[in-house]
Image (cartoon, coloured by chain):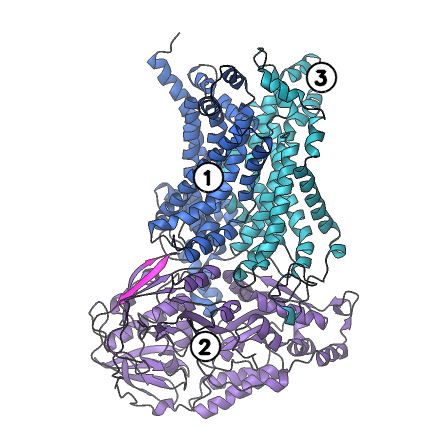
Chain colours: A blue, B cyan, C purple
C-alpha cells in the first residue's frame, strides 16, 4: 500500500524532529563542554595578550593585570561568566578577542571562506583520487597490481602535512613558479594547500571506500552481474559504486572534524588566514572568546553536514528509506545501519 | 575507518543472506586455488614479512636503544655540526653536532610509547562506551551516543591542544589529547559492531541455549566486535606518532633534549635546503613504521 | 655581495642638554629613483597590533617605522640625537623638563597639521593607556604633564628625573599619531593609525598581509636618511610568512624582494652576489640566564660563578649565532651605548668552574651531576625563544656537572612566571637602545624587573644612573653596574642576537634605525 502524502509528512516530522533536537543539543553541549575545558586551562589570557604587544616590556604589575581582567569580563565566577557568554552567543555576539581586540565574529567570518575553499577543494581532490585508484584496482586483472595500487594512498597519511607542504612549495612555487607560495591574495593560492590536505584526507577516505568496493565485489549482485556478462566498468558504476556510497558518505561527515584540525598545519605552512590557524593562536594565547567562537562554528558546520549526511541515507539506501517511511522503525535504526555500514564495508 | 572487510565473523554472518545460487565458476576456481590457510599464506608474503621486520626493528630500538645507537644522543660535538650522513654518523649530525641516528634510536621509546598510550586511551574509552552503549541499548545508548556526538563535534586538534596546554607539553599529554580526540570515532564503530553482533543468529542461538549475559558479552560479542576496533587501533598508532610532530610544528614544542620522532621531523624543517637529512631521515623512519603497522593492521583486520 | 653591518656604536658624550639647534635641514640632493613601484617584504609573523606606540614587537615596528615619524631621530652610529619633527629641543639640568620646537610644515595623512596640542594629546593618551603601552610607560616614567606654549612649542614635565626620555622621543614608541588616532581606543588603534610618515596604512588582513602606500607630498624626512621628499616606491607589501623555509625559498625564487629574519643557518647560502644581507646587533642586555637569587641553589654565588665560567660563549655563537656576531662580554651588548667589556671576568674556564663547585661542596654524583647534602645541582631555566641557545648551554653545563632543565613556554606563560616569581633562571634578552636596560632588568624598584637579586650597592648604582644628566658621570655609573653584575654573576650572558635580513641584489636603501628597526624610506629597486 502506497503511503499517502500525509503519512509522508508525519513520517518526515517524526524522523526530522528528533534530529533537530539532537542537532541543537550537540551544539549546546559542545559549547558548554568547551567552556568548562577552557576554564581549566592554566595561564592568563590577559598576560598572553599583553605579551603579544609588549614583548620584553610586558608589565607584570598585579594591580594593572587585575584591572584588565575585569575589563575583559574574566573576573566573575565561572557560572556568571558562563551565563553572560552564553546569552551573548545566543544573540549572535561572540565577544571580542582578548589578544587582538577584534570582534570574534569578524575574525571567524574572515577566516571561514579561506578554510572552506581549501577544505572543499581538498575533499574533492582526495575523493576523486581515491575513487580513481580504487577503480583501477577493481578492474585490475593482476593481483600484484591491485596490491600495489592499494599501498599507495596510505603513504599520504604517513607523511606529516608540513613536510609534504614544504616539498610542494619548493617544487611548484619556487621551482616551477606555477602557484604562489603563500597567502590568499591570488585565487591560485588555494591549490597547493588543497593538494597538501588532500593527501591525508584522500588516504582516510580511501581506507573506507576501497574496502567497501572490494567487499562489494564479492557481493551477490556482482555475482549476478558477472553472470549477466556486464562489462567491469558498468559493474563498477552501476552496482559497486552505489553500494559503497553509504559508508563513504558517513566517513565524509567524520572528515569534517579532521579537516578543522588538518587546516591548522596547512594554513601555517602556506601563510593563509583560516579557522585552524586562529584556533592554534587562540589556544596559545588562552584567548577564550576566540576558542569558544571557533568551536561553536565548527560544531555548527559539523552538525549541519551530519544532518545532511543522515538525510542523504534515505536517498542512497532503500533499507533506510523504508525505515524513514515505515512507522515503527526510528532513526536509531538508520544510525545503526550507517555506522555498521562504515565498518562492514 | 578501518577495513575489517571479510573478517570471519562478518562473512559467516553474511553467508546466511547470500543468494543460494551457485556462484560463477571463475570465482570458484579462484577460491579452490588456495592451498595454504589464508592467514598463513598472507603472512608469508614479502610485504607482510618486511612490515614485520620493520616493526621488530622499531621494538628493538624502543627496548634497547643503548645497544643499537652508535653515539650518545645528548652531547654534541661543535666541530661536527650539520655533517651529511656518512662515516660514523649514519644519519649525519644536527645543528648542535649531535648524532641524528642515535637520536632517532633513542627517540623510539618516547614516540612509540606515547603513541601507544594515545591508542590505548582511545581504545579504552571507546571500548567501554561503545560496548556498554551497544549492549545495553535503550536510554543509556541514547545518552552515550549524544555524548559521543559532542566528543566528535569538538575538533580533535582543539581537544589535543587543550589537553596539552593544560598538562604542559610532552609526548604523554599529546598522547592523551590525541587518544581522546580519536575516542569518538572508535566508540561509534565499536557500538555499531556490538549492535550488529548482538543480533546475529549465533548469539540468538546462545541465548536460546540459556547462556547468561556475561557469557554472551565476553564469549561472543567482544571477540567478534573487538576485532575491527583492534585493526583500527593499529592504524591510529601511525596517526598518533604524526600528531606529536604536527603539534610540535604548531608551536607546542617538546622539552629538550629528549629526542622524539615528531619533534625531530618538525625541528629539522628549517634546514630542509641546507641539511635535508635532519627532517627527511627521521621522516622516512616514521613513514616506514607507520606503513608497516598499517600493513599488519590490515592483516589483523582480515584483509588479504 | 654587499653587507651593511652597522659598527657597534660606543658611548658618545652627547651633551644632550646643550643640543639646542643642531638641525640644519639640508637634505642631500642626489636624485634617487626606483625602477619598480612595488616592493614585497616578507615578514616572519603577524604584527597583531599596527600601532607603534603600543607594540614592542620588532615585526610590527619594522612596518610602523614607515608610517609614524618621531620628534627626534638618533644617529645609529654615533648615538647622537638629531632633530626630526622637532626642529630643536632643550632639556633642563635635572632632566625633569624637555622643551621641543616643532617644524611648521608637517601634516598627518588625514591632512591635519602637527601642532603642540597634538603632541600633548599623544603623550596624555599614552600615559592613560598604561599597561596596554608598557614600553611607553617605561619611557614616560614619572610623566607629569605637557605644557603647550604656542602652536609650535611645548614642554614635557616629569615629577622625577628621566634620563631616557629624550632618547625615547626618537623611538616609535613615542612616535606621533594624528589627534584622531590618539583619541581612539587601544583596540581601534591596533587596526590602523594615522601618522605623518612617508607611507600610509592601506590594508591589514591578519595572518595574511599588510600593505602600505606612499604618502603624496611628504617632505620632512630626518636628515639621517639618504634623500628627501616622497618615498621612492609607491607600494610596499608585507606578506606574513611564518615558515622560515618559505621565506628563504621565496627570496631565492624572486617571489619576495626582502625577507625579515634570515635564519642564521641559511646565512652562508645567501652570502653571494645575488643577495644583500643586512645585519645589526641588538642593543640592550644580551640573551642571558637571568637569576632568581631567592632560590636556594641559585643564591649560591659559587654555582652562579661556575655557570658563568662554564658557559662557552664562543661555541654558542658558532652553533647558534650569526657569522659576524661577537660573543657577549658584558651585561650589555657591545653595540649598546655605555658598553664596557668584562671579558676577563667571564672567560670560559671549565676547570676553574669545577674547582669553584668542589670548593663549595658540590661533589660529583653517580650520574655525573654534582650533589651537596643530598641535593642535586639541578636548576631550571624558563624561556619562550632561543631554544637552541639553551640546549647548547645545557650541554656545556652538563660537562661541569650542572643539570640545567629547560622549560620552554609561551610568551604569556613566561610573563606569568615572572609575575609569580616561580623560576630559577629566565632565558631571554632585553632589547633597549639605552643602558637603562640594566635598571629595568635588575632594579628591584623597577615595576616589572626580571632578575631577583638582593644587592643594595647595585640597586644604588642603577638608580643613580637613571637620574644623572651628565653623560660622562652616567657612563661611569653604567660601567660600575656592568662590573658589579658580572663580578657577582648576577647574569650569565649567552649570545648577542643579531637582526639579520636579506634582499635580492637590486634592492637598495634598506637601513636600520638606532633601535635596529628597519627604515624603508630610501628603499628602491635598481634597473
Of all residues, the one furthest to the right in this rendering is C366
Above or below, comparing residue A179 to residue A151 in the picture: below
Q: Is residue B166 magenta?
A: no
Query: Which residue position holds label 1?
Result: A126
Q: Is residue C214 magenta?
A: yes
In percent of width and height, residue A231 lies at: 47, 21
Name which residue lies at 62% across and 33% down: B229
Looking at the rendering, the stretch of residues picked out in magenta corresponds to: C204-226
| Frontmost residue, A95 versus A230 | A230
In percent of width and height, residue C321 lies at: 54, 72
Above or below, comparing residue B78 to residue A193 in the picture: below
Chain ID, mark 2: C
Query: Which residue position holds label 2?
Result: C280
- From this viewpoint, is residue A287 visible? no
Query: Which residue position holds label 3?
Result: B211
Chain ID, mark 1: A
Q: Residues within 10 Å of mark 1 (few under 14, many from 20)?
A: many
SS at badge 3: loop
SS at badge 1: helix
| Frontmost residue, C318 versus A178 | A178
Magenta-drawn stretch, dominant element (helix, strand or loop): loop
Amino acid at each position: 500500500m502506497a503511503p499517502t502524502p500525509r503519512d509522508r509528512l508525519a513520517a518526515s516530522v517524526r524522523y526530522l524532529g528528533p534530529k533537530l533536537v539532537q542537532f541543537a543539543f550537540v551544539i549546546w553541549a559542545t559549547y558548554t563542554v568547551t567552556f568548562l575545558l577552557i576554564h581549566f586551562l592554566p595561564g592568563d589570557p590577559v598576560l598572553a595578550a599583553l605579551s603579544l604587544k609588549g614583548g620584553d616590556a610586558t608589565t607584570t604589575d598585579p594591580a594593572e593585570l587585575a584591572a584588565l581582567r575585569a575589563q575583559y569580563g574574566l573576573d566573575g565566577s565561572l557560572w556568571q561568566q558562563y551565563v553572560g557568554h552564553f546569552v551573548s552567543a545566543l544573540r549572535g555576539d561572540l565577544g571580542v578577542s582578548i589578544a587582538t581586540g577584534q570582534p570574534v565574529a569578524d575574525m571567524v567570518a574572515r577566516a571561514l571562506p579561506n578554510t572552506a575553499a581549501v577544505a572543499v577543494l581538498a575533499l574533492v581532490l582526495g575523493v576523486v583520487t581515491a575513487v580513481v585508484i580504487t577503480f583501477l584496482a577493481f578492474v585490475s586483472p593482476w593481483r600484484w597490481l591491485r596490491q600495489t595500487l592499494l599501498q599507495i594512498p596510505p603513504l599520504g597519511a604517513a607523511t606529516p602535512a608540513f613536510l609534504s607542504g614544504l616539498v610542494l612549495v619548493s617544487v611548484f612555487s619556487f621551482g616551477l613558479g606555477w602557484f604562489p607560495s603563500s597567502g590568499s591574495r591570488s585565487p591560485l593560492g588555494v591549490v597547493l594547500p588543497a593538494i597538501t590536505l588532500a593527501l591525508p584526507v584522500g588516504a582516510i577516505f580511501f581506507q573506507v571506500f576501497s574496502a567497501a568496493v572490494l567487499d562489494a565485489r564479492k557481493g551477490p549482485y556482482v555475482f549476478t552481474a558477472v553472470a549477466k556478462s556486464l562489462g567491469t566498468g558498468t559493474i563498477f558504476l552501476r552496482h559497486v559504486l552505489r553500494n559503497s556510497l553509504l559508508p563513504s558518505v558517513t566517513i565524509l561527515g567524520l572528515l569534517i572534524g579532521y579537516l578543522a584540525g588538518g587546516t591548522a598545519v596547512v594554513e601555517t605552512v602556506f601563510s593563509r588566514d583560516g579557522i585552524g590557524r586562529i584556533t592554534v593562536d587562540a589556544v596559545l594565547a588562552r584567548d577564550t572568546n576566540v576558542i569558544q567562537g571557533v568551536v561553536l562554528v565548527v560544531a555548527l558546520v559539523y552538525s549541519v553536514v551530519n544532518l545532511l549526511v543522515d538525510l542523504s541515507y534515505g536517498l542512497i539506501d532503500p533499507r533506510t528509506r523504508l525505515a524513514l517511511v515505515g512507522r515503527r522503525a526510528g532513526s536509531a535504526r538508520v544510525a545503526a545501519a550507517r555506522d555498521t555500514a562504515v565498518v562492514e564495508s | 575507518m578501518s577495513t575489517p572487510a571479510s573478517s570471519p565473523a562478518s562473512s559467516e554472518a553474511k553467508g546466511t543472506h547470500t543468494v543460494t545460487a551457485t556462484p560463477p565458476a571463475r570465482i570458484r576456481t579462484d577460491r579452490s586455488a588456495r592451498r595454504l590457510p589464508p592467514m598463513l599464506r598472507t603472512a608469508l608474503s614479502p610485504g607482510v614479512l618486511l612490515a614485520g621486520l620493520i616493526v621488530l626493528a622499531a621494538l628493538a630500538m624502543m627496548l634497547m636503544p643503548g645497544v643499537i645507537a652508535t653515539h650518545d644522543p645528548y652531547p654534541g660535538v661543535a666541530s661536527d655540526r650539520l655533517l651529511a650522513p656518512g662515516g660514523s654518523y649514519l644519519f649525519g649530525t644536527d645543528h648542535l653536532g649531535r648524532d641524528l641516528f642515535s637520536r632517532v634510536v633513542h627517540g623510539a621509546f618516547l614516540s612509540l610509547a606515547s603513541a601507544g598510550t594515545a591508542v590505548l586511551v582511545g581504545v579504552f574509552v571507546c571500548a567501554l562506551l561503545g560496548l556498554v552503549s551497544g549492549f545495553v541499548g535503550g536510554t543509556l545508548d541514547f545518552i552515550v551516543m549524544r555524548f559521543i556526538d559532542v566528543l566528535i563535534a569538538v575538533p580533535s586538534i582543539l581537544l589535543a591542544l587543550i589537553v596539552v596546554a593544560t598538562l604542559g607539553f610532552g609526548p604523554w599529554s599529546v598522547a592523551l589529547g590525541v587518544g581522546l580526540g580519536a575516542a569518538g570515532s572508535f566508540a561509534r564503530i565499536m557500538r555499531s559492531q556490538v549492535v550488529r553482533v548482538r543480533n546475529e543468529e549465533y548469539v540468538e542461538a546462545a541465548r536460546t541455549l540459556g547462556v547468561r549475559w556475561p557469557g554472551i558479552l565476553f564469549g561472543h560479542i567482544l571477540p567478534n566486535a573487538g576485532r575491527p576496533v583492534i585493526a583500527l587501533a593499529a592504524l591510529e598508532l601511525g596517526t598518533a606518532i604524526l600528531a606529536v610532530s604536527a603539534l610540535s610544528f604548531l608551536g607546542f614544542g617538546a622539552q629538550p633534549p629528549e629526542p622524539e620522532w615528531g619533534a625531530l621531523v618538525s625541528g629539522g624543517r628549517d634546514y630542509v635546503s641546507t641539511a635535508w637529512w635532519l627532517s627527511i631521515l627521521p621522516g622516512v623512519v616514521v613513514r616506514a613504521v607507520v606503513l608497516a603497522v598499517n600493513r599488519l593492521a590490515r592483516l589483523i583486520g582480515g584483509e588479504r | 655581495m654587499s653587507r651593511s653591518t652597522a659598527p657597534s656604536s660606543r658611548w658618545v658624550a652627547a651633551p644632550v642638554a646643550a643640543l639646542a639647534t643642531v638641525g640644519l635641514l639640508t637634505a642631500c640632493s642626489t636624485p634617487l629613483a626606483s625602477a619598480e613601484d612595488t616592493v614585497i617584504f616578507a615578514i616572519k609573523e603577524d604584527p597583531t597590533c599596527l600601532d607603534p606606540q603600543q607594540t614592542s614587537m620588532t615585526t610590527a615596528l619594522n612596518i610602523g617605522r614607515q608610517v609614524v615619524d618621531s620628534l627626534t631621530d638618533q644617529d645609529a652610529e654615533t648615538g647622537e640625537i638629531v632633530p626630526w619633527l622637532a626642529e630643536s629641543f632643550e632639556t633642563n639640568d635635572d632632566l625633569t623638563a624637555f622643551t621641543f620646537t616643532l617644524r611648521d610644515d608637517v601634516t598627518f595623512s588625514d591632512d591635519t597639521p602637527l601642532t603642540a596640542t597634538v603632541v600633548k594629546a599623544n603623550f596624555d593618551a599614552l600615559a592613560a593607556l598604561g599597561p596596554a603601552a608598557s614600553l611607553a610607560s617605561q619611557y614616560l616614567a614619572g610623566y607629569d604633564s605637557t605644557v603647550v606654549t604656542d602652536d609650535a612649542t611645548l614642554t614635557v614635565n616629569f615629577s622625577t628625573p628621566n634620563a631616557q626620555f629624550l632618547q625615547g622621543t626618537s623611538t616609535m614608541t613615542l612616535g606621533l599619531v594624528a589627534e584622531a588616532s590618539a583619541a581612539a581606543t587601544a583596540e581601534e588603534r591596533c587596526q590602523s593609525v594615522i601618522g605623518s610618515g612617508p607611507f600610509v596604512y592601506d590594508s591589514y588582513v591578519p595572518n595574511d598581509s599588510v600593505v602600505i602606500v606612499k604618502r603624496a607630498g611628504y617632505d620632512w624626512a630626518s636628515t639621517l636618511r639618504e634623500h628627501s621628499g616622497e618615498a621612492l616606491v609607491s607600494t610596499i607589501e608585507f606578506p606574513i610568512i611564518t615558515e622560515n623555509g618559505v621565506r628563504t625559498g621565496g627570496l631565492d625564487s624572486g617571489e619576495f624582494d626582502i625577507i625579515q629574519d634570515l635564519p642564521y643557518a641559511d646565512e652562508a647560502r645567501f652570502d653571494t652576489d645575488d643577495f644583500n644581507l643586512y645585519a645589526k646587533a641588538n642593543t640592550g642586555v644580551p640573551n642571558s640566564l637571568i637569576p632568581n637569587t631567592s632560590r636556594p641553589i641559585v643564591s649560591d654565588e659559587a654555582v652562579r660563578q661556575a655557570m658563568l665560567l662554564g658557559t662557552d660563549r664562543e661555541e654558542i655563537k658558532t652553533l647558534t649565532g650569526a657569522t659576524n656576531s661577537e660573543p657577549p662580554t658584558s651585561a650589555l651588548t657591545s653595540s649598546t651605548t655605555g658598553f664596557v667589556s668584562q671579558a676577563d671576568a667571564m672567560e670560559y674556564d671549565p676547570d676553574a668552574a669545577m674547582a669553584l663547585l668542589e670548593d663549595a661542596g658540590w661533589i660529583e654524583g653517580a650520574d655525573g651531576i654534582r650533589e651537596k647534602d643530598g641535593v642535586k645541582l639541578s636548576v631550571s631555566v624558563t624561556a619562550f625563544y632561543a631554544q637552541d641557545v639553551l640546549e647548547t648551554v645545557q650541554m656545556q653545563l652538563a660537562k661541569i656537572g650542572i643539570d640545567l632543565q629547560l622549560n620552554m613556554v609561551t610568551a604569556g606563560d613566561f610573563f606569568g612566571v615572572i609575575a609569580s616569581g616561580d623560576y630559577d633562571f629566565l632565558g631571554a634578552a632585553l632589547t633597549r637602545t639605552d643602558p637603562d636596560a640594566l635598571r629595568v632588568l635588575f632594579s628591584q624598584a623597577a615595576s616589572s624587573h626580571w632578575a631577583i637579586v638582593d644587592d643594595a650597592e647595585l640597586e644604588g648604582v642603577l638608580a643613580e644612573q637613571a637620574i644623572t644628566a651628565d653623560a660622562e658621570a652616567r657612563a661611569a655609573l653604567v660601567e660600575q653596574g656592568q662590573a658589579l653584575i658580572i663580578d657577582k654573576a648576577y647574569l650569565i650572558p649567552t649570545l648577542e642576537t643579531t637582526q639579520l635580513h636579506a634582499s635580492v641584489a637590486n634592492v637598495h636603501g634598506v637601513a636600520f634605525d638606532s633601535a635596529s628597526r628597519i627604515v624603508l624610506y630610501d628603499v628602491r629597486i635598481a634597473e
